[in-house]
Image (cartoon, grey):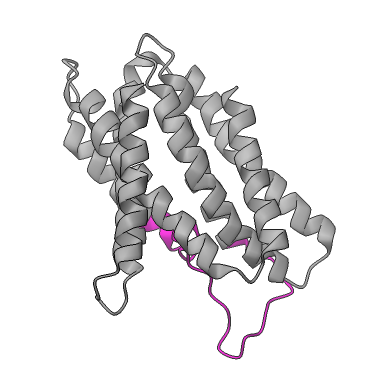
């Protein structure tokens, strides 16, 4: 179930990007919504799981590790995971796939999928909360990635392979998370919550370059948070 949902999310994002390649407004709106959703799931679901445990684990330290790890990974994909696509100064597009971008995104996606299946090991059903929040974020993330990939002057086969690899990266992370010993569950949650916290914060704050009060942005973030809150009630 989890694997299918994650892969379908990438397929949906790729299809939207293919048919609406120039619709940057839609992808930005979806990113804002997913940022609110990720932030709500992190604060209302993952943090309580992390800090309410009686196991001896320095929860805050692992959150910081997650934030720092995301900062490192951000240097590879150039911010694509939270809505940035960079081109050359003259609008030129490379004919060579930037491997650092792909590698950074795959690692990022792999880590995001890790805690989903781990919740099955003696913990509550909250795994579905992370799954649905991540899936919506995956759609918006894939729209940005696909728009970038479709602009590359490479064979369609290579574009297809890149998207396939990205689609299976989170499920692979989920699979690996399912076989990691249960005693490391909270460390995984801490790291991924730090990643989610960083990504959602960057999307929300960087989207307002002029620092004006944007009611549409506030509404989208609020709706994402509301959906996240409703998910945690389930």
Residue at (38, 56) in percent of width and height: 72
Using the rendered view, name the quadrant where residue 45 is placed. top left
Q: Is residue 167 left or right of residue 189?
A: right
Q: Residue at x 46, y 60 (%)?
A: 29
118 vs 155, left or right, is left
Give coordinates of residue 124: x percent, y percent.
35, 14
Picture quarter containing residue 63?
top left
Q: Is residue 183 above or below residue 33?
A: above
Could you tell whether 164 is left or right of 39 in the image? Answer: right
- Percent position of residue 26, x then y: 53, 62
Q: Nearer the viewer, residue 188 or 15?
A: 15
Front residue of 98 and 40 = 40
Residue 232 appears in view? yes
User: Is 67 in front, or is 33?
Assistant: 33
Residues rendered magenta in the picture: 71-100
Q: Main secondary structure of the magenta part?
A: loop
- Is residue 84 on the magenta stretch? yes
Q: Quadrant of residue 11?
A: top right
Spot occupied by residue 22 in the image (x, y as percentages of width and height) = 64, 72
The residue depicted at 37 percent of the width and 8 percent of the height is 122
């Amino acid at each position: 179930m989890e694997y299918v949902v994650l892969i379908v999310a990438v397929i949906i994002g790729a299809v939207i990007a293919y048919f609406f390649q120039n619709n940057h407004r839609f992808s930005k709106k979806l990113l804002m919504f997913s940022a609110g959703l990720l932030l709500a799931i992190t604060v209302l679901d993952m943090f309580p799981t992390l800090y309410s445990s009686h196991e001896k684990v320095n929860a805050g330290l692992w959150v910081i590790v997650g934030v720092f790890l995301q900062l490192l990974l951000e240097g590879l994909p150039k911010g694509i995971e939270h809505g940035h696509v960079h081109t050359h100064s003259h609008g030129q597009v490379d004919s060579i796939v930037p491997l650092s971008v792909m590698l950074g995104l795959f690692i990022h996606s792999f880590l995001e999928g890790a805690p989903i299946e781990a919740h099955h090991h003696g913990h509550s059903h909250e795994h579905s909360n992370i799954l649905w929040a991540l899936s919506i974020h995956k759609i918006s993330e894939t729209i940005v990635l696909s728009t970038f990939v479709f602009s590359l002057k490479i064979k369609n086969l290579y574009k297809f392979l890149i998207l396939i690899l990205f689609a299976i990266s989170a499920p692979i992370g989920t699979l690996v998370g399912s076989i990691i010993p249960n005693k490391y569950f909270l460390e995984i949650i801490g790291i991924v919550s730090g990643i989610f916290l960083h990504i959602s914060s960057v999307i929300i704050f960087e989207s307002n370059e002029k620092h004006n009060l944007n009611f549409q942005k506030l509404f989208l973030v609020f709706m994402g948070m509301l959906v996240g809150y409703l998910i945690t009630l389930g």
